[in-house]
Image (tube, rainbow, N blue to C red):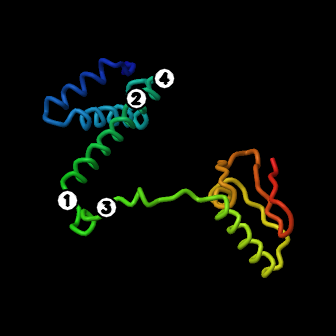
Amino acid sequence: MVKKRLTPNLIGYRLASRVYKGLNFRWALLVSILDLLLKCCFFWEAPLISRRNFLKTSAVATGAVAATTVEALAQSSADRALPAPIAALQSMRSQARPITGAERQARIEKARKLMVQNKLDAILLTGGTSMVYFSNIRWGLSERMFAMVLPVKGEPFFVS
């Protein structure tokens, strides 16, 4: 048996035949791509597929699934009305106030009191919510450590 190479024309033909049969375009595209991938992966007589075409096909299939899922979620959330108590809620954005330096200093003092009670000399805060809570420094985690050391006595310092 002669092995055929997977070509865009073959995908287009399968897609067109499925759309003609009444499937949604995105579902037809997804079914066509998955059909070809399954045939290429599990059957020896299947058409050959290059690594580049496999990656392209996989990317298109992922996009089709994501688009269909987002579309379905948007449609289902539009169909549902919010319960009356939730719909009656009003924004409290105007009442929100930024955290002041004095409030952050109070947080540090409270942490120091708890450290004395628990017999700790210092705490090490790495990037994330704890560092933001005490210092307002937003630092993500990475392979290079950046941390804040909060001693019981003295000023906090940073380690990089």
Do the CB atoms of the residues marked 4 and 3 lie less than 8 Å apart? no
Q: Which residue is mark 2?
A: 57
Tell me the amino acid under the disc marked 2.
Answer: Thr
Dot placed on the residue nearer the N-terminal end, 1 or 4: 4
Measuring from the top left, give residue 82's x and y in whole percent: 23, 62
Image spot of residue 100 (x, y percent): 62, 59
Is tag 2's residue or tag 1's residue first in the polypeptide sequence? 2
- Pick whichever of labels 4 and 2 is earlier in the sequence: 4
- Numbered tag placed on residue 90 in the rendering: 3
Circles 2 and 3 in contact, beta carbons < 8 Å: no
Indicate the quadrant where residue 111 lies: bottom right
- Residue shown at 66% from the left, 58% from the top: 101
Amino acid carrying mark 3 in the image:
Gln
Q: Residue furthest bottom?
A: 117
Label 3 or label 1, whichever comes before in sequence order: 1
Type of the residue with mark 1? Ala
Residue at mark 4: 52
Q: Contact, CB < 8 Å: mark 4 with mark 2?
A: no
Amino acid type indicated by mark 4: Arg
**Label drawn at residue 81:** 1
Q: CA distance from mark 2 to mark 1?
A: 38 Å
Q: CA distance from mark 4 to mark 2?
A: 9 Å
Q: Quadrant of residue 17?
A: top left
The CA distance from mark 3 to mark 1 is 17 Å
Horizontal side of 40 relative to 32 (left or right) equals: right
